[in-house]
Amino acid sequence: MQVFISHAQDDSALAGLIAKELQDSGFQVWTPAELFPGDNWAKAMGEALDHSQAMVVLLTPSWLASPYAKNEVTYALGKETYKDRVIPVFASSPQQFSRDSIPWILKSFPSVDLDKMGAKKGIAKLSKVLLEAA
């Protein structure tokens, strides 16, 4: 299963860590790190979204401020292949942003809270949730 990680550019390091752990668990993960200067960014993102079957949404203040990230989630929610495979990941503490600012639809999905669980346990739980959804 290919996983798309929806994240803000400011959260690239965390997205990379999660991508590596998911790859080690047997998932294919597309990341923008695969893009080179001069590549058609919009086309590559669209193709990655189209070929993925699951989405991990890294919820941070930067993600909430990004119109691109919200568009990625909107796409996934409208595509049958993502059904039951959009997983919100709380990647910042509640003090950094209000949980009320998270789009309501994302609150209805099973989520992973890296702030409460810690990165290692949280990513392990994320892998488990993805495996169960496969």
Image (cartoon, grey):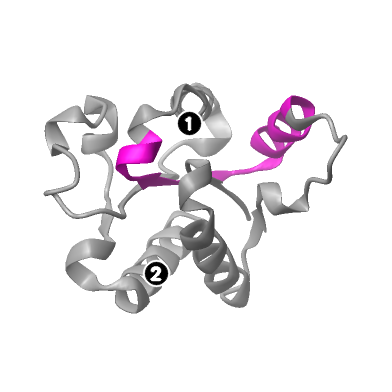
Name which residue lies at 27% across and 49% down: 110
Disc 2: which residue: 123
- Is tag 1's residue or tag 2's residue first in the polypeptide sequence? 1
At 53% from the left and 73% from the top, the residue drawn is 21
Q: Position of residue 71 (x, y in %)?
A: 50, 22
- The kind of residue tagged 2 is Ile
Query: Looking at the image, which residue sits at the far right?
Result: 38
In the shown orientation, is residue 110 left or right of residue 26?
Answer: left
Q: Which mark is residue 69?
A: 1
Q: Decide: is 68 above or below 106.
A: above
In the image, the segment drawn in magenta is 42-63
Residue toward you, 112 or 70: 70
Image position, residue 20 (x, y; %): 59, 70
Q: Which residue shows up at 24% across the image and 32% down it?
A: 102
Q: Amino acid at mark 1?
A: Ala
> Is 31 in front, or is 79?
31
Q: Quadrant of residue 121?
A: bottom left
Q: Secondary structure at mark 1?
A: helix
Residue 55 coordinates in the image, percent (x, y): 50, 44
Look at discs 1 and 2 and give the one toward the viewer. Answer: 1
- Binning the other alpha carbons within 10 Å of mark 2 as few (below 14), some (14 to 19) or many (20 upward) gives many
- The spot of residue 116 in percent (x, y) is 17, 66
From the viewer's perspective, is 82 left or right of 23?
left
Q: Is residue 59 above or below residue 123?
A: above
Locate the N terminus and report the quarter of the image it occupies.
bottom right
